Amino acid sequence: MTSLPKVTVWNEFRHEKSDAAVQAIYPRGIHEAVAEPLRQAGFPVRTATLDEPEHGLTEAVLDETDVLVWWGHRAHPEVRDEIVDRVQARVLGGMGLLVLHSGHFSKVFKRLMGTSCDLKWREAEERERFWVVAPSHPITAGLGEYFELPQEEMYGEFFDIPAPDELVLVSWFQGGEVFRSGCCYSRGRGRIFYFRPGHETYPTYYDANVQRVIANAVRWLAPAGGPVVTFGHRPQPLEAVT
Ligand code: ZN
């Protein structure tokens, strides 16, 4: 693909409406904070939120989406199973999916992983240090050997996910835990990247390194243009078999 992938940034958009501290950090919503640097980098970006019809993820919107970015937290149960089915089918068909932070517990991510996706967590204003463990991977392009966020929520191992196809970032937290914070998968024709940071009470999505990882990930997640696969009964063999 030569042109930049078309991105839809999805956010449940609830904390920003009810919590003044979150609203102060993300006055236009986390989705807009994630979308804006992507727009500035030239990506065509739209946003979608939980309370829109069909959660903003109509078939028409997904027809125009190469990469879907997902931020959700307390409203995971409100995401309708019909939309989860739809997003899963799109990923298997080739759409990229970038799951951020508490999206680890989204129905969409759990469906695609097939595990509990559970982890340890703590909100204690602690420092997070991300180590690059795949310096050849395009998602780490332009980063140093490590980068830090001064304050984040801690997520700790064991993170109950399938072993990633490629692990590109590992986080260390001030309190001593570690976490696989940048995980690559393929499912069907599509790619998935899980990126850990982004708790709603910290200005994480304004961080230049975080923005770089997100932009790199969106490029990597773009549909690769491989064959459209088909399944099922094949009564006519390609070669004579008798
Ligand atoms: Zn959080």
Image: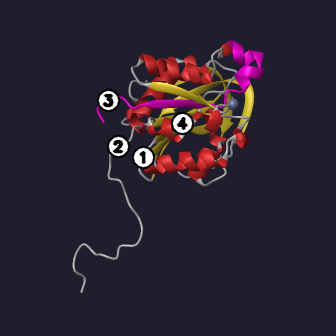
Q: Mark 3 or 2 closer to N-term?
A: 3
| SS class, disc 1 | loop
**Residue shown at 67% from the left, 51% from the top:** 116
Numbered circle sitting on residue 224: 2
> Foreground residue, 144 or 79?
79
| SS class, disc 4 | strand
Question: Residues in magenta?
Answer: 1-24
Residue annotated with mark 1:
94
Q: Position of residue 88 (x, y in %)?
A: 54, 49
Q: Are marks 1 and 2 in contact (CB under 8 Å)?
A: yes
Residue annotated with mark 4:
170
Q: Position of residue 143 (x, y in %)?
A: 43, 24
Q: Is residue 157 visible?
A: no
| SS class, disc 3 | loop
Q: Is residue 40 visible?
A: yes
Residue 16 part of the magenta-drawn span: yes
Numbered circle sitting on residue 79: none
For the N terminus, the image quarter is top left
Q: Nearer the viewer, mark 4 or mark 3?
A: 3
**Residue shown at 45% from the left, 23% from the top:** 212
